[in-house]
Amino acid sequence: MPGRDAPVPAATRWLFGDQLGPAFLDDHDGPVLLVESRRVFARRVFHRQKAHLVLSAMRHRAAELGDRCRYARVDRYRDALAEVGGQLQVIQPTSRAAVAFVRDLAAERDVERLPARGYVTTREDFTAWTGSRGRRRLLMEDFYREARRHHGVLMDGDQPVGGRWNLDADNREPPSKGQPTLGVPDPWWPTEDDVDAAVREDLDRWERDGDVTFIGVDGPRRFAATRAEALTALEDFVTHRLPHFGPHEDAVMTADPWMAHSLLSAPMNLGLLDPLEVVEAAEQAYRRGDVPLQSAEGFVRQVMGWRDYVWHLYWHLGEGYRHANRLGARRHLPAWWRDLDGDATDAACLAHTLNEVRDHGWVHHIPRLMILGNYAAQRGWRPDELTHWYHRAFVDGYDWVMVPNVVGMSQHADAGVMATKPYVAGGAYINRMTDHCGRCRFDPTKRVGEDACPFTAGYWWYLDRNRGRLEGNQRMTRALGGLDRLRDLDALVAQEDRRGSTPP
Ligand SMILES: Cc1cc2nc3c(=O)[nH]c(=O)nc-3n(C[C@H](O)[C@H](O)[C@H](O)COP(=O)(O)OP(=O)(O)OC[C@H]3O[C@@H](n4cnc5c(N)ncnc54)[C@H](O)[C@@H]3O)c2cc1C
Ligand code: SF4
């Protein structure tokens, strides 16, 4: 016990590894704790580049904070917490498991719990919005419009600039014909430093010692790991690439992995960039006349629409949501997929995408949704295993963002809470929106036979298997009607039953 006149020790703010930007310190000028727990990496098989990015970002932050920061390298969180006396301050963490951990801790010692930050809208905003909905669906589009009104983003008075809320219809262009890349400037890339070198050395040693294993390959760090790098990446994106963001947002080009995407999910999810400053930078570029409205709106919709909506749904839908499996998908993820072995398959789109994840721990939204997620849904793989896999394999993967995106958006395992219809499609879609099919040994127009496209066959196989569960959905009526007209359905089902999860 301190004596009566002894100074009360300043509260220590314990920052998680995704709370690294200035917004997570606000006016706190006391000590800071960052905990590097080896057990986190020993427990799960992460992508090598994800482990590198997170450790690099944490160690860079500790170096910036200097003597104020206690950087604990321990086995378990509790080992570090036992060394810190006085009050702990904790900003609401981003996973349910971490929130439960902090709650338990608060029963044992003095913990001040502070509200979440790092999103444009607050939990209270979302709760008020859901309360105003009555029995209407919680549509992202309506939430996004409300958020734009509330924050005055891309608004002229009470109307959206340009008179339309949604410019998606202008943003669905396929890849340009005869052009291997979009032809936009490359993203800004960070330069690695001594901190990165030390992280690499540690990861190599842990792996050699058999303490941890990784998936994917090592490679140059591609994503911002400090606030300064994140601001540079944002400025570079807004200046050089945002003007091209909109039209080809949904297209995939084999020779151009990054296209006009921002690569800002990783620094935003590490807490290094505040999404509102990202949105404001995009709006200012539009107001200056540097960026067309369809690009600015398309990008703002992703950040303050989709990203915030997904964050709120994670909490709103409850603990059980992660286990939702309303289509009864029971197959386990096969080893070739888990190990990111794109070379195992002849399907050009799948091979390329899995190998990109192996090489970078990142692909853009459409390969995540319409190639990887689409294939997993068609094959009937378990949504919980798939969520776990995406979380580990992607540099920007965290529990809050993976659960709704995988369970709800990509696997329709919630029977339509998040998306009004399943995101499944056959080879015709992939042939239209990507340039993969021209160099594939399968034919996107064939559904049965030696050269039948596994996506085209898989699409009908999925509909046949889930017919009873999808029949009540009006948006599936046409697709299910098509199924009735297939004369070779029995042969197709037998073919796909045989293929199952073996690589096509
Ligand atoms: C199955 C699946 C898994 C996904 N996993 C993740 C993930 O682990 N982490 C993650 O941040 N995003 C995830 N997304 C959303 C999206 O694919 C990525 O945010 C985006 O591809 C990241 O690249 P970018 O920063 O260049 O994005 P851009 O195309 O430049 O988009 C701008 C920003 O919008 C936000 N955004 C757009 N869509 C979403 C969304 N559906 N959910 C959340 N944020 C969104 C991101 O912050 C992104 O940085 C996933 C989507 C799907 C379908
Ligand atoms: S033909 Fe089918 S498997 Fe091949 S690239 Fe096209 S969609 Fe993918």
Image (cartoon, rainbow, N blue to C red):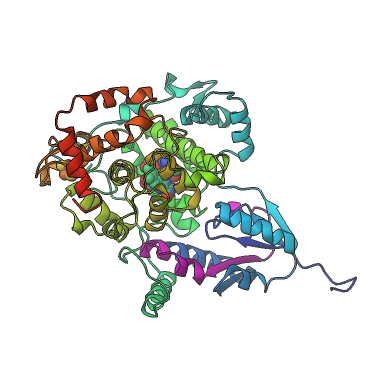
Q: Nearer the viewer, residue 385 or 367?
A: 385
Residue at the image point whose x is 38% and y is 55% from the top = 389
Q: Is residue 442 left or right of residue 395?
A: left
Asked if 27 appears above or below 174 in the picture, the reply is below
Expressed as whole percent of the image width and height from the top left, the position of residue 339 reads 30, 61
Quarter of the rendering containing residue 332: bottom left
Q: Which residues are magenta?
A: 23-52
Is 42 contained in the magenta span? Answer: yes
Expressed as whole percent of the image width and height from the top left, the position of residue 145 reads 50, 27
Expressed as whole percent of the image width and height from the top left, the position of residue 231 reads 46, 51
Quarter of the rendering containing residue 19: bottom right
Is 439 contained in the magenta span? Answer: no
Asked if 347 appears above or below 415 in the picture, the reply is below
Q: Is residue 498 left or right of residue 208?
A: left
Asked if 41 appears above or below 477 in the picture, the reply is below
Expressed as whole percent of the image width and height from the top left, the position of residue 191 reads 37, 63
Q: Nearer the viewer, residue 160 or 210?
A: 210
Residue at the image point whose x is 41% and y is 69% from the top = 196
